[in-house]
Amino acid sequence: MTYAAVRRRRPQLSDEVVAYLRDQIMSGELRPGVFIRLDEVAAALGVSITPVREALLTLRGEDMVELEPRRGYRVAPLSRQDIVDVFALQGHVAGQLVARAAASITTEQLDDLRAQQEGLRTAVAGDAGADELEEREFEFHRTLNRVADARKLSWFLHTALRYTPVRFYSSDAGWRASMLAAHDEVLDALAARDAERATAQMARHFTDGAERLLAHLDAQGLWES
């Protein structure tokens, strides 16, 4: 699963706030129905109120927060089925992309992906920070999606991945090991030019992500009334 989010250029302050709040919401740190205090978010991130307001407008457009007149923004409803649906969509689109890559990948492109995988493996073994792992994971999947040469599908995946709590995964040792194993399986399928196997492995990559997040949210009692 490509849990790397959307911040490969130097983001605007509001983009940083958006990424922070997305992770807080999707990892259950901010629960559905909770009002978001602009001053607390600004203080936590060391920014002014303005980029926080801008971030909340963006998140409202993504159905992650709702605006209640005269009271402010609160976290939008989020169900277990929402999590399942989001990851199923991500897995389906990513599966289509990897299937196309399997049909056209060159030896040079495969070698590039393998080199990136070894860089990821080294970073994991060296207990690299979350930022480095996110960057490397993103680059691996971006390279793979470029091989697929499906611009619009890649854009849809990029959009769907906004709902992934990146920091939750990159900080989880279990996910790190699972991510490396999934990448290895995908690379083996690509080397065999086996589109069906590559698609199945990619889908499993995302299913694993959904299961880990749901277990975490269940443990937090997020669905309890």
Image: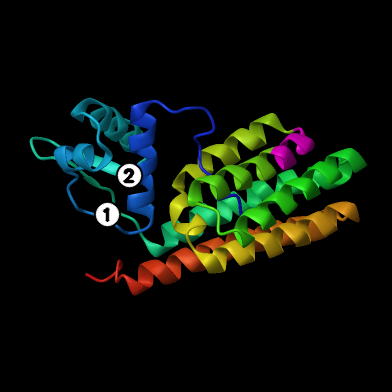
* Residue at the image position 21 percent from the left and 70 percent from the top: 225
Q: Is residue 148 magenta?
A: yes
- Answer whether residue 196 is visible to the viewer in this image: no
- Answer whether residue 157 is visible to the viewer in this image: yes
Please say if 51 is above or below 60.
above
The range drawn in magenta is 143-149
Amino acid type, label 2 = Leu
| Left or right side of 183 for 7 | left
Residue identified by numbered label 1: 30
Q: State the image quarter where residue 11 is shown.
A: top left
Amino acid type, label 1 = Leu
Residue identified by numbered label 2: 21
Q: Which residue lies most toward the left here?
A: 70
Residue 213: where, in percent of width, then height?
45, 64
Q: Are marks 1 and 2 in contact (CB under 8 Å)?
A: yes
| Left or right side of 199 for 39 | left
